[in-house]
């Protein structure tokens, strides 16, 4: 069980800090929740404590993981299908894992694709979500500001 002040990652949202652990009555059911503030968005999320493993709540990465993330961001674009719905589903499947390196691949591929030929609105939204996920992890692990984290990601993909 996590405690107040722990830094965690919530898949599809990113890294944050457990601000409180509250017992709440929702739909006539008493349950304990983690109150998490997501670093890149300042958004608060309530996560049922007994569902933490099920939703993929995990510890933040270490500095070595961040180094691997940057290595992936610097690699060439993966071969991707031209079928938009298949590509979107493939990317969504990687995003749902909540794995830092999977999200880095999605971010890199979509950023490169955007520079080459632009993105559909669905791909743009996916890129924004993926990039914010990485930004939040950098903010929490490297204690950096949002703008600096975003610039570091942009610079890595350009390299």
Image: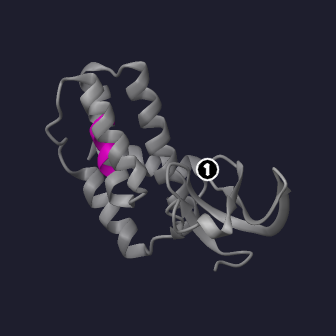
Q: Is residue 122 above or below residue 149?
A: above
Looking at the image, which is closer to me, 129 or 148? 129
What secondary structure is the magenta-colored segment mainly? helix
- In the visual, does 32 lie left or right of 114? right
Instruction: Check disc 1 and report the residue beneath it.
Output: 40
Relative depth, front residue between 128 and 44 = 44
The percent coordinates of residue 140 (x first, y second) are 58, 65
On screen, 21 above or below 36?
below
- Residue at image location 49% in from the left, 40% down from the top: 129
Residue 107 among magenta residues:
yes
Residue 14 can be seen, yes or no: yes
User: The residue tagged with tag 1: helix, strand or loop?
Assistant: loop
Q: Is residue 8 rendered to the left or right of residue 47?
A: left
> Which residue in the rendered view is the most extreme toward the front?
28
Residue drawn at (51%, 52%) of the image:
135
Q: Residues within 10 Å of mark 1 (few under 14, many from 20)?
A: many
Return the x and y of residue 101 as percentages of the image width and height: 33, 59
Is residue 8 within the magenta segment?
A: no
Report the span colored magenta.
104-110
Query: Looking at the image, which is closer to me, 94 or 41?
Result: 94
């Amino acid at each position: 069980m996590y405690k107040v002040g722990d830094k965690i990652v919530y898949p599809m949202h990113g890294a944050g800090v457990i601000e409180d652990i509250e017992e709440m009555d929702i739909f006539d059911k008493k349950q304990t929740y983690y109150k998490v503030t997501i670093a890149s968005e300042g958004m608060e999320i309530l996560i049922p404590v007994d569902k933490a493993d099920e939703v993929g709540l995990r510890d933040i990465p270490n500095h070595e993981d961040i180094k691997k993330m940057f290595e992936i961001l610097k690699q060439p674009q993966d071969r991707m299908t031209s079928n938009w719905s298949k590509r979107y589903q493939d990317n969504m499947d990687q995003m749902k894992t909540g794995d830092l390196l999977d999200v880095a691949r999605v971010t890199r591929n979509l950023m490169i694709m955007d520079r080459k030929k632009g993105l559909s609105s669905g791909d743009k939204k996916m890129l924004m979500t993926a990039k914010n996920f990485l930004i939040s992890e950098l903010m929490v692990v490297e204690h950096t500001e949002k703008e600096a984290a975003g610039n570091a990601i942009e610079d890595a993909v350009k390299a």
